């Protein structure tokens, strides 16, 4: 018979590998929601700034986190895509019934580069509909896809239910392999183990007791299998700054990447990155790590430290990554520095979602743990049929949390 310690070890590791990330809005609800009985049919109309307070109350009831008039100002009046004259300032659509807002779908304009052209993209955000009115959700999505000035439609944070509706409306799942698989490294084993044990149903006292043993198991597994990015100095240095202090030299990397004719890339510039990562009321800390060789930039990584409740799991996320070449030494230096930055920020895990397979394969040397979404959260649809067909190729994508609305919120 397998020794008790070994059985416990295997059970914990199985739980970690099989963890599922809860999808926002899937099970969220509130006693403050509208009654289940429908008194009048719902109609759809374009959202206005005057709807902000009621929409924020709706999305909050459905577990989508804080929002504010100041953030609406940022998203739909201070958005670089709008200020540069490319995109229309369209907030989205609301479902209304008897004068009450019972549903909302936002649409955030973004700019992309592909084959030397600038594309106007629209990213869905904050889909929330009261349970009694969910049969009317397609009204919101069809309104989203009817935007005539949009070249590319994106949903980068789809729930399982939303994904099915996107498919029904002829949007396709992102062809970039394993986008639904999150890689992660454990930086602080005990709070991580406690969080996992609580998630599988143990009460806090038992979870606290079990985490002491589980953390020893994890620490051993991490040490023996080399499960953390390490860097040996090889003529490379990494400098950490904030998004306030982006260096002009980073422009050379963006320009180099956009010249790859068959690669779809979200537009990056100092102005776009500051707009993206500095929302009003921001609860997160974002750091930019630049890898240099003889003073010349070789690549950068942007890490968002999400923080969390004192007793909760604290995460850091690789929000963006750009490389001048596919030199494994640069990847090694950047990810080792990202781990160090996350540890200094007090995070318990560092997560990686998305990025092309060649980058994910480089990360495999550090044997990250992984978890899988219930379904791929990223869907796309191009207005032009030829463009849509081109984007069916995995090689056309460099999708990451920088795309869509995944890292836009406070």
Image: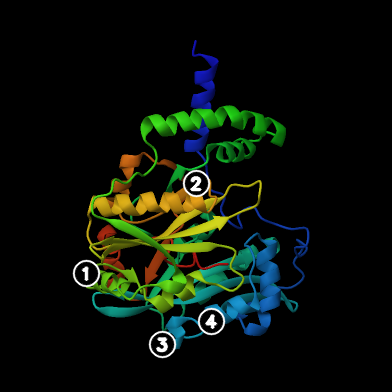
Q: CA distance from mark 4 to mark 1?
A: 30 Å
Quadrant housing residue 281: bottom right
369 is higher (above) or lower (below) than 72: above
Q: CA distance from mark 4 to mark 3?
A: 13 Å
Badge 2 vs badge 4, beta-carbon distance below 8 Å: no
Residue 302, image x and y in percent? 41, 62
Q: Secondary structure at mark 1?
A: loop
Q: Residues within 10 Å of mark 4 (few under 14, many from 20)?
A: many
Q: Earlier in the sequence, mark 4 or mark 1?
A: 4
> Which residue corresponds to mark 3?
84
Asked if residue 33 lies left or right of residue 200, the reply is right
Asked if residue 216 lies left or right of residue 258, the reply is right
Q: Which of 127 and 232 lies nearest the eye of the viewer? A: 232
Q: CA distance from mark 2 to mark 4?
A: 33 Å
Q: Earlier in the sequence, mark 1 or mark 3?
A: 3
> Which residue corresponds to mark 2?
349
Disc number at residue 76? 4
> Which residue corresponds to mark 1?
260
Q: Earlier in the sequence, mark 2 or mark 4?
A: 4
């Amino acid at each position: 018979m397998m020794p008790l310690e070994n059985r416990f070890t295997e059970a914990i590791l199985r739980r970690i590998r099989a963890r599922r990330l809860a999808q926002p809005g899937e099970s969220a609800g509130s006693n403050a929601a509208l009654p289940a009985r429908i008194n009048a049919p719902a109609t759809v109309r374009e959202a206005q700034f005057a709807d902000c307070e009621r929409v924020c109350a709706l999305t909050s009831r459905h577990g989508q986190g804080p929002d504010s008039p100041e953030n609406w100002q940022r998203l739909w009046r201070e958005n670089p895509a709008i200020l540069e004259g490319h995109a229309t300032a369209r907030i989205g659509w609301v479902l209304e019934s008897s004068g009450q807002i019972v549903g909302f779908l936002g649409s955030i304009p973004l700019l992309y580069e592909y084959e030397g052209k600038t594309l106007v993209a629209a990213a869905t955000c904050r889909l929330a509909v009261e349970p009694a009115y969910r049969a009317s959700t397609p009204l919101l999505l069809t309104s989203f896809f009817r935007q005539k000035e949009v070249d590319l439609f994106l949903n980068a944070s789809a729930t399982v239910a939303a994904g099915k509706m996107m498919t029904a409306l002829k949007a396709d799942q992102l062809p970039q392999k394993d986008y639904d698989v999150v890689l992660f490294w454990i930086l602080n084993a005990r709070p991580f183990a406690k969080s996992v044990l609580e998630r599988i149903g143990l009460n806090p006292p038992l979870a606290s007791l079990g985490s002491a043993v589980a953390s020893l198991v994890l620490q051993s597994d991490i040490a023996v299998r080399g499960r953390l990015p390490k860097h040996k100095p090889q003529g490379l240095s990494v400098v950490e700054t904030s998004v306030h202090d982006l260096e002009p030299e980073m422009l050379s990397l963006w320009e180099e990447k956009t010249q790859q004719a068959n690669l779809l890339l979200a537009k990056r510039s100092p102005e776009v990155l500051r707009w993206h990562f500095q929302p009003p009321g921001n609860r997160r800390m974002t750091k930019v790590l630049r890898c240099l060789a003889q003073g010349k930039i070789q690549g950068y990584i942007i890490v968002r430290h999400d923080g969390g409740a004192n007793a909760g799991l604290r995460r850091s996320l690789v929000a963006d990554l750009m490389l001048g070449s596919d030199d494994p030494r640069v990847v090694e230096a950047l990810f080792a520095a990202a781990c160090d930055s996350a540890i200094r920020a007090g995070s318990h895990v560092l997560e990686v979602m998305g990025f092309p397979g060649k980058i994910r394969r480089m990360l495999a040397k550090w044997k990250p743990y992984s978890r899988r979404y219930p379904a791929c959260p990223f869907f796309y649809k191009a207005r032009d049929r030829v463009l849509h067909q081109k984007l069916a190729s995995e090689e056309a994508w460099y999708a990451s949390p920088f795309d869509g609305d995944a890292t836009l919120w406070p």
